[in-house]
Image (cartoon, rainbow, N blue to C red):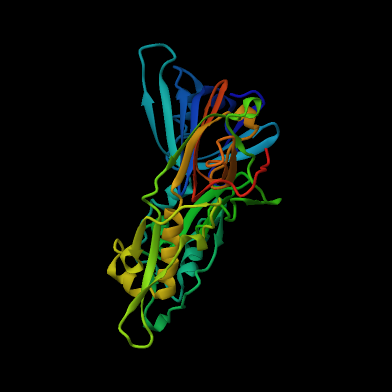
Amino acid sequence: MLRGAQLSIRTGFITHDPVPPALIDAITELQVTRQSPRGGFQMKLNLAKGGAVETEMLPGGMFTPGKRFIFSLTIDGLRTVLLDGFVARYDVAQSNESGKATLSVTGGDVTQLMDQYDVTGLPMPGMPPMGQVAFILARWTPLGVIAAILPPPSWTIPNPVNGWHVQQGTDYGHVNRLARDCGYVFMVEPTEEEGVTTAYWGPDLGGLTPGGNFNSQGFSMQPALTVNMDQASNVQSLNFTFDGTQKLLPYLLSQEVRGTGLTIPIPIPGEVLSPPMGPGWIPYARFSKLADLGRNSDRETQARLDVPELVMRGLGEAAQASRVVGASGTLDVARYGRVLVPGRLVPVRGAGPHHDGVYLVKSVTTSIKRGELRQNFQLTRNAHGSWTQEVAA
């Protein structure tokens, strides 16, 4: 691994302790991927014949599905929790060559557990959408899940006398469906404290979410990704894409009040939730009536949506569809001095006036081997250019 970098792994379902040193020594490669809305990991270990992994850890249930592993990386004293994960499966690859047998352990974040148990029919009387979300997420508090819920602009408390909502499917499926109905997103990400996870349910604000750009010191922007600037460069590669056919403008059809019979379209621009990240505004290429946005939803869902809820759904769809500028590359972690965190904002410089500016980190894959630390990333944004000529290095 990189000099000055230290990997820490803790395990335990409710309480968590450091894993045995023999497990750290046996790791040949660790890959952690974090992207919206879910993250995962794969840990490859040397399955030496007669070693501690084969004779003690594997039979002792160290890698049993559901086992919790918290991966943290410290670089020059700055600790970042990469993932709070849970084992889903493991695979053993034996070999005739001595020392070549491997154990691959694969898992995901807490949404993996949330998506395992179907509790359809669980009554939730008198609960509006955010009440249902709070009720469901409260069950995961023992695992360190802290709910960050923003109520939708329009909601009603159903009268239990007339019936009540029931849960449909798994916890993750139900919460995600409610988010979709409101034009919201549901995502989880680890905090600065090991074993604590933020579960955000609210509008897609492009990285400006609790647990995202807001930390214990307040608002923060990640250091700039720098390319083509000699010794100041901190990325090994950086490529850009632009798909101008995908930007969506939803609209409502409203009947003219004076009884002329004419209908006028009312646009619902995504810039309301996702302000332009640069001065180069990108024109809309697709137009969709808001009623059509629910074509993949069940009829019951469409029937209960009123105009404010339709507008919020349209805003959410438009905000996500407006990010048609993308970038991908590989980070030189040694030069960058820290790990890049997904779901937050980061400036890019040195790529020319058209591509410089602020981006949202869409996903990051961190690969760790002995003597090697690499991060592959994907960025996205909704405009060209930069609002400012100066960024923090």
Q: Nearer the viewer, residue 176 or 296?
A: 296
User: Which residue, as the protein is rendered here, is positioned at the far top?
Assistant: 97
Quarter containing the C terminus:
top right
Q: Looking at the rendering, which quadrant does residue 314 occupy? A: bottom left
Residue 382 percent location from the top left of the image: 49, 51
Q: Is residue 96 above or below residue 301?
A: above
Residue 260 percent location from the top left of the image: 32, 85
Residue 363 percent location from the top left of the image: 49, 42
| For residue 238, side relative to residue 302 (left or right) | right
Q: Looking at the rendering, which quadrant does residue 313 occupy? A: bottom left
Question: From where the camera sits, is residue 169 visible?
Answer: no
Number of numbered discs visible in the structure rendering: 0
Residue at the (58%, 38%) spot, across then down: 340
Residue at the (65%, 44%) spot, across then down: 389
Residue at the (45%, 29%) spot, across then down: 58
Residue 27 percent location from the top left of the image: 51, 25
Q: Is residue 32 above or below residue 143?
A: above
Question: From where the camera sits, is residue 265 visible?
Answer: yes
Quarter containing the N terminus:
top right
Q: Is residue 306 above or below residue 366?
A: below
